Image (cartoon, rainbow, N blue to C red):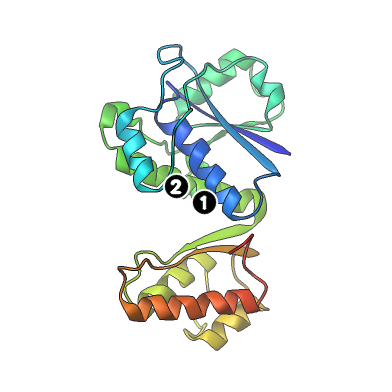
Amino acid sequence: MTKILFVCHGNICRSPAAELLLRRLLLRAGLGGEFETASAATSSEEIGNPVYPPMRRVLAERGIDCAGKTARRLRRRDYQDYDLLIGMDEENLWNMRRLFGGDPESKLHNFMDYAGFPGEEIADPWYTRDFERACADIELACEGLLYHLTGIVTVDFSLCPDIPSLYRELREKLQWEDWYGENLDALYDVLTGLPHRGERFLLTLPGEDAPREAQLYAARIRQVFADAGALAGAE
């Protein structure tokens, strides 16, 4: 089992969001038994407190229940207990290196590196008050970490209002060559032989409030992924 610990300053906003969002992705992918996610604080200010209400509301809008999650302090033994220890910003990483006496096994990582933005940080919403932006950055980094760990790519059609936007999402996430066609036969060819990013895929389909055309075509796209044996988990 691969054990992942997310770390931020207080363990009431960013790191618990990362812990819970990645856990949901792993469960969707059928990998809940292969990974363990947890989170901790570098400070003692919030120990024992639940997830901060504004972040709890943003997570609830995404279907995430924070019940039972309380802040705990990072411990020296966490370095041996976890395979990856991921900080939200450089201050978190500096505090981890100080506690652990460095990083001899190269276990410490900046979360936004996995989102494709090396060196950038997830701003602390305690100060910025932008909890939505922080959560969106965490979701992006979780998707990147999932790909890094498993080769699974997350494809989100939930905001796609029409067929062209469905293909834009596919092009972006699978990193299609420009000459690839935008039809279901071409999609099958991509998934079964043409170069693309990803080995398996998690699909989020348009919701009931999306245009009917987008809903129906997204369902057909999902069937192509299924026929190609490219869906992850129970998707």
- Which element type, helix, strand or loop, lies under badge 1? helix
| Amino acid tagged 2 | Glu
Q: Residue at x 48, y 28 (%)?
A: 68
Query: Would residue 118 be found to the left or right of residue 29 on screen?
Result: left
| Amino acid tagged 1 | Glu
Figure label count: 2
Name the residue tied to disc 2. 139
Query: Quick check: 150 above or below 65?
Result: below
Label number found at residue 197: none
- Looking at the rendering, in which quadrant would you find the N terminus? top right
Name the residue tied to disc 1. 143
Q: Is residue 114 among what the camera can see?
A: no
Q: Residue at x 58, y 64 (%)?
A: 235
Q: Residues within 10 Å of mark 1 (few under 14, many from 20)?
A: many
Q: Residues within 10 Å of mark 2 (few under 14, many from 20)?
A: some
Query: Would residue 100 be found to the left or right of residue 50 on screen?
Result: right
Query: Quick check: 197 above or below 10?
Result: below
Image coords of residue 126 (percent x, y):
31, 27
Image coords of residue 219 (percent x, y):
48, 76
Q: Residue at x 40, y 12 (%)?
A: 45
Query: Quick check: 26 above or below 2?
Result: below
